Amino acid sequence: MDIFKLIFEHDILLEHLSGVEDPRHTAKKEASLEDFLKPAKTYTKYYLTGTKLDEQKFGLSALETYQDICDTLSSIFADKNVYSSNGELVENLSDALQEIQIHDHLIIGTGDAPESRLVEAIRLNSDKNVRDVLPELTELMDLGFVILYAENAHHGKDFHFFSARNLYEFFFEKFQPMTKKPTFRYFSINGKKVGSERTFYFETWTLHRPPHGFEEVTIDSKLR
């Protein structure tokens, strides 16, 4: 049995990580009324993970349906250009997702490749985690790019997505047809409800009654 989990968080403020002072939270700076009323930039993040339940293997890439998941992600971004961590154009996103290394990333968007300085700035390695480079991610997201980061999992890798745009509808609907498989269960999870490691791995102890904020998606589920 594959347990697929889409963990989402919306309306995340990242200004403090991008080196931009928000006048509404900074006593040192005297802000104008225009600054005070200016809407704060918000971002979204999505964490795709899973559990191969019968073998107690944890990680998206450990699932039997991993290739199908990669193919689905490729279809979601079919109209976008994809760039590797060195700024080169990726021809086949599904293949790239299956081969991507932990702590590496892909840059997804329309138009030309991002400037080399931004590509270099977010180059990740084993000495960094994604939080270390959020300021650069913020700048790329403001330009319309989606960042995919390969996260370390117990038995393989998971995927983190960062975006200024809400991608939830695309993820929800594109993965929904996979629930036709009797060995695939899909959960949409509010990241604010994941308060502990025990809750994160709910499927190992309370699959029959998921925690509040953990919604199972079936073929008949509707977006609220």
Image (tube, rainbow, N blue to C red):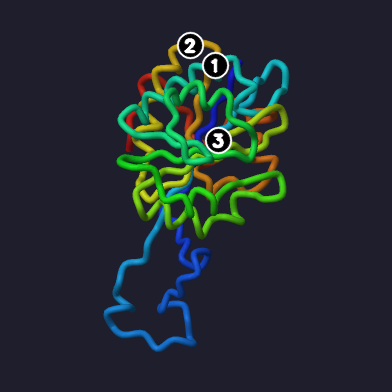
The foreground one among 104 and 40 is 104
Q: Residue at x 30, y 41 (%)?
A: 111
Badge 2 marks a residue whose secondary structure is: loop
Q: Distance between the residues labelled 3 and 2?
A: 22 Å
Q: Which residue is drawn at 37% across and 55% down?
A: 142
User: Image height check: is 149 above or below 131?
Assistant: above
Find the residue positioned furthest to the left: 34
The foreground one among 122 and 29 is 122
Would you name the residue on which mark 3 appears? Answer: 159
Indicate the amino acid at tag 2: Lys
Indicate the amino acid at tag 3: Phe
Label 3: how many Cα within 10 Å (few below 14, some 14–19, many 20+): many
Would you name the residue on which mark 2 appears? Answer: 181
Find the residue positioned furthest to the top: 182
Q: Which of marks 1 and 2 is nearer the N terminus?
A: 1
User: Image height check: is 91 above or below 142?
Assistant: above
User: Foreground mark, 3 or 2?
Assistant: 3
Q: Earlier in the sequence, mark 3 or mark 1?
A: 1
User: Foreground mark, 3 or 1?
Assistant: 3
Mark 1 near mark 2, Cβ–Cβ under 8 Å? yes
Residue 151 position within the rendered picture, expressed as x and y whole percent measured from the top left: 62, 38
Badge 1 marks a residue whose secondary structure is: loop
Residue 201 placement, left or right of 8: right
Residue 150 is drawn in which quadrant?
top right
Indicate the amino acid at tag 1: Thr
Would you name the residue on which mark 1 appears? Answer: 65
Q: How far apart are marks 1 and 2 (CA)?
A: 10 Å
Residue 41 is drawn in which quadrant?
bottom left
User: Image height check: is 55 above or below 123?
Assistant: above
Residue 64 position within the rendered picture, expressed as x and y whole percent measured from the top left: 59, 14
